[in-house]
Image (cartoon, coloured by chain):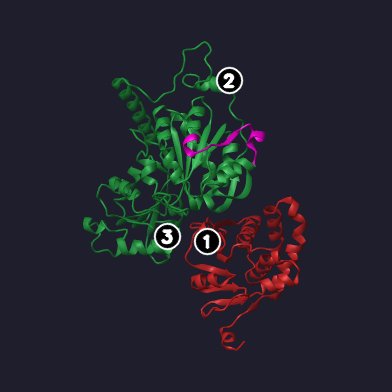
Amino acid sequence: MSELKLMKGNEALAEAAIRAGVDAYFGYPITPQSEVIEHLMAERPEERTGMIVLQAESEIAAINMVYGAASTGKKVMTSSSSPGISLKLEGISYLAGAELPAVIVNVVRGGPGLGTIQPSQADYFQSVKGGGHGDYKLYVLAPASVQEMSDFVEDAFDIAFKYRAPVLILSDGLIGQMMEKVYLKDQQERISDEEVIKKYGGWAVTGKTDRKRNIITSLDLQSEKMEARVHRLLKKYAQMEKEDLRFEKISCDDAEYLFVAYGSSARIAQKAVELARKKGIKAGLLRPITLFPFPKQQLFELADQVKGILSVELNAGQMVEDVRLSVEHKVAVEHFGRTGGIIHTPEEVLEALEEKIIHNERIGDYKTRESSIL
Amino acid sequence: MTEEIIIAGFGGQGVLSMGKILAYSGIMQDEEVSWMPSYGPEMRGGTANVTVILSDERISSPYLKMYDTAIILNQQSMDKFEETVKPGGTLLYDPNGISQHPTRTDIKIYQIEGAKLAAEMGNKKIFNMVVLGAFLKIKPIVKLENVIEGLKKSLSERYHYLIPLNKEAIIEGMGNVSPYTIEEQALPN
């Protein structure tokens, strides 16, 4: 039996972490993410499940605690918001390099710098194009509802352990702060030490007994070995693209125009689809649920069907680059988005579709694109 | 049925909790709901607002430009949100502290003396419930019994003794809401 509640996205995510049997959370408060650690502290999960919740002295300390705890084969997570995630990036690159399963949550706010505390999606590049150094990728889940904030915690850990790789849940201030109905899953038991040894004893540092010692490191000074490690990572990413891509198509069957949007922007674009259809404009929405892997093939196919694509993002134009790469110039792709913490309204999104795509005589003209945000 | 509502006033007036109770009431009758607050600098001492949507279908955008109903509780919010009511929509406001009354003729306008009635009832904190009552009289989108159920859910148990008072406030609001016509504005005070 699942439990029905009205919760903020951040609270639902925190509650889902307890119920998913997460072993440890290390974090540091920052708006608009603080309800995650607040809820975890208030719920006293150490009494409910034995889960450890610790407010570290900084974001950097928290991500390194994640590195240490993840090395033991336990379920570990951290969360922060944009400037805090920037601080964590060194650790995230190390997690990827050392092939450790962990879940990182970014409730994005406006940037660059300290920016603003209001919602934004300006961390798209940071999330899918590395962010930290080196040839690595994160599996990135983008929740668009409070229900998904809850559900994706377990999904993220499934992926993290399937691939022994860090997974990012990329939310934002809107999804984190809003309240919606949420069906919470039943409490799962935390994994026992014996089970960890049985399942992950091949790599995790569980206390050496009679086996060869396991070493967790991202350092390999022998180039051949390091290249082999990079190739191993690349194989995982290829497998993610093949087996774990997620997306949602809304009103795409007869669409002549397509919005591409994720997270909060997808909700707003969905309303823009409704408004467009009332006006007789056949609009549809492709919502990437995973940002890496990206629904390249689906876009490539839709490009044969639609007359133009508008990438709707709360940033100055980031995902639009991946949309353009996916459609390979078969159809014009433009971007629309507000920045600085301002949220675009569904009406604005529809106007942008009409102006930039439907009535744009210079559609697809490279020169008009440069200043598209202004 | 979908009802898109903005509730706006000063921080501390109970704007966010009114929205939360409305959302909970919606859940009690099996509706889809969303509650999207303004957060950030405006919350700290200035205006606060929340968008609440109740629908029998999946809710797309929790963030809107135009609303079916605006519940307005201070002048700054009147300045900002009068124009966001859809033509034919509803504007409900407390005239207390309002110097520039609404002027639109394409919407239905109602007044509730929420602050005054709450003071008369001896508890200024139930102001938001008086206003909620007024709203539910105009738009009975949730049943009173579901509001009470919603209150039980959203208040922690140690505050449950306050539920009868809240119910009384809602009924007081229901009985005291009045339509406001633009002509009244022309009359000298």
The label shown at residue A344 is: 3
Where residue A140 appears, as percent x and y from the top left, is 42, 40
- The amino acid pointed to by label 1 is Glu
Residue B42: image tag: 1
Q: Same chain for the residues at labels 2 and 3, yes or no? A: yes
Mark 3 belongs to which amino acid?
His
How crowded is the residue under tag 2: few (<14 C-alpha within 10 Å), some, or many (20+)? few
| Chain letter, green | A
Q: Secondary structure at mark 3?
A: loop
* Chain of the residue on which disc 3 is drawn: A
In the picture shown, does residue A34 fall above or below A160? below
Q: Which residues are magenta?
A: A43-61
In the picture, the disc for residue A194 is 2
- A55 in the magenta segment: yes
Q: Position of residue A73 (x, y in %)?
A: 51, 25
Residue drawn 56% across the image and 69% down it: B69
As drawn, A13 above or below B67? above
| Residue closest to the far front | A57
Q: Residue at x 46, y 18 (%)?
A: A214
Query: Which chain is represented by red in the image?
Result: B
Examine the structure image and report whether residue B130 is included in the region drawn in magenta: no
Figure quadrant of the C terminus of chain B: bottom right
Q: What is the x, y in percent for residue A334?
A: 30, 56
In 3D space, how far apart are the residues under numbered discs 3 and 1 (Cα atoms)? Answer: 19 Å
Q: Report how far apart the C-alphas of labels 2 and 3 lie in the structure.
A: 51 Å
Discs 2/1, front: 1
Q: Is residue B85 visible to us here?
A: no
Q: Quadrant of residue B146?
A: bottom right
Are circles 2 and 1 on residues that touch, CB within 8 Å? no
Mark 1, residues whose alpha carbon is within 10 Å: few (<14), some, or many (≥20)?
few
In what element is the residue under mark 2?
helix
